[in-house]
């Protein structure tokens, strides 16, 4: 059986095919590096050990450098031509900031569709702290940008953030499960209007409204989500 081929438009935000063994190893490496990010924060080790750790990390960096990186533009071109492999999809999505399962700077932020709602969840550690004990507001803004962009999984076109308005209602604690929700509000030709929210233990901490702009053509619901049209019109 031939390997499935993917087009860029087939990729859902923050979703990939089942990882190949190579992609799973990238995820394991990213997780290990993310754990190191947490451990080095204000590491209370003697200077001799810090010098030793620096030498180890520099050695690892030099070892990694000999292999280079897969060409991002070539991956994108294959996907735009509908000839992308499963590894091409994971190489594109798994290294996304915050949601990438192989990214060492990702919690990760998990995103999925549940009926007419985009849902998300993340557990933010010390790396993401702003005020003491609270998630940095900029991290939450980035999370909402990614969450609300996923409302485009309901439509045929894909675009970019035009406007993102955020209201911080309460502090969002670190080291807690943080839940996210987003919904489509309106499709207006090449504009997609949506709203998002952040929740911790049932309390809303952030509210957001956004407009996405289609890069090519007008937004329209995918046939499998046609039932959402009535709900959108009722907003």
Image (cartoon, helix red, strand yellow):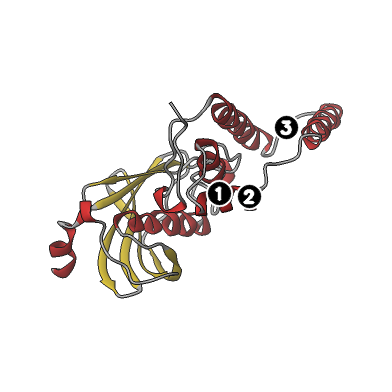
Farthest front residue in view? 1
Give the crowd class for mark 3: few <14, some 14-19, many >=20 residues within 10 Å.
few
Q: Are marks 1 and 2 in contact (CB under 8 Å)?
A: yes
Q: Residue 72 or 162: which is nearer the viewer?
A: 72
Check the image and report above or below for 117 versus 15: below
Q: Position of residue 222 (x, y in %)?
A: 26, 57
Check the image and report above or below for 122 versus 155: above
Q: Within the image, what quadrant is residue 41 found in? A: top right
User: Which quadrant holds the C terminus?
Assistant: bottom left
Query: What is the distance, in whole Å, between disc 1 and disc 2 at their CAs?
Result: 6 Å
Query: What is the distance, in whole Å, between disc 1 and disc 3 at their CAs?
Result: 47 Å
Residue positioned 82% across, 33% down in the render: 54
Q: In this rendering, would 41 be left or right of 55? A: left
Q: Residue 92 or 119: which is nearer the viewer?
A: 92
Residue positioned 51% across, 49% down in the render: 79
Q: Position of residue 178 (x, y in %)?
A: 38, 44
Label 3 sits on residue: 44
Counting residues from the start of the chain, the first of labels 1 and 3 encountered is 3
User: Could you tell me which secondary element the residue under label 1 belongs to?
Assistant: helix
Q: Is residue 235 visible?
A: no
Q: Residue 21 or 197: which is nearer the viewer?
A: 21
Label 1 sits on residue: 78
Judged by depth in the image, the label closer to the viewer, 1 or 3, is 1
Residue 74 circle label:
2
Q: Within the image, what quadrant is residue 34 found in? A: top right
Q: Is residue 23 visible?
A: yes
Q: Are marks 1 and 3 in contact (CB under 8 Å)?
A: no
Q: Position of residue 86 (x, y in %)?
A: 50, 36
Judged by depth in the image, the label closer to the viewer, 2 or 3, is 2
User: Could you tell me which secondary element the residue under label 2 belongs to?
Assistant: helix
Residue positioned 83% across, 34% down in the render: 62
Residue 125 circle label:
none
């Amino acid at each position: 059986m031939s390997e499935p081929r993917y087009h860029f438009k087939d990729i859902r935000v923050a979703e990939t095919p089942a990882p190949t063994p190579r992609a799973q190893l990238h995820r394991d490496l990213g997780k290990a590096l993310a754990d190191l990010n947490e451990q080095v924060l204000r590491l209370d080790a003697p200077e001799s050990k810090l010098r030793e750790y620096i030498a180890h990390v520099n050695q690892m960096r030099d070892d990694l450098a000999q292999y280079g990186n897969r060409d991002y533009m070539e991956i994108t071109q294959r996907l735009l031509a509908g000839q992308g492999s499963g590894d091409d999809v994971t190489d594109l999505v798994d290294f996304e900031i915050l949601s990438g399962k192989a990214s060492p700077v990702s919690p990760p932020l998990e995103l999925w569709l549940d009926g007419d709602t985009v849902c998300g969840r993340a557990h933010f550690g010390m790396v993401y702290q702003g005020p003491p004990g609270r998630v940095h507001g900029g991290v939450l803004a980035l999370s909402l940008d990614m969450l609300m962009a996923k409302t485009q999984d309901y439509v045929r076109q894909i675009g970019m953030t035009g406007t993102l308005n955020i209201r911080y209602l309460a502090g969002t604690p670190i080291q807690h499960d943080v839940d996210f929700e987003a919904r489509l509000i309106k499709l207006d030709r090449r504009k997609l209007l949506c709203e998002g929210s952040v929740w911790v233990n049932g309390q809303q901490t952030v509210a957001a409204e956004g407009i996405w702009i289609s890069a090519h053509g007008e937004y329209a619901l995918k046939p499998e989500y046609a039932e959402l049209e009535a709900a959108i019109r009722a907003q």
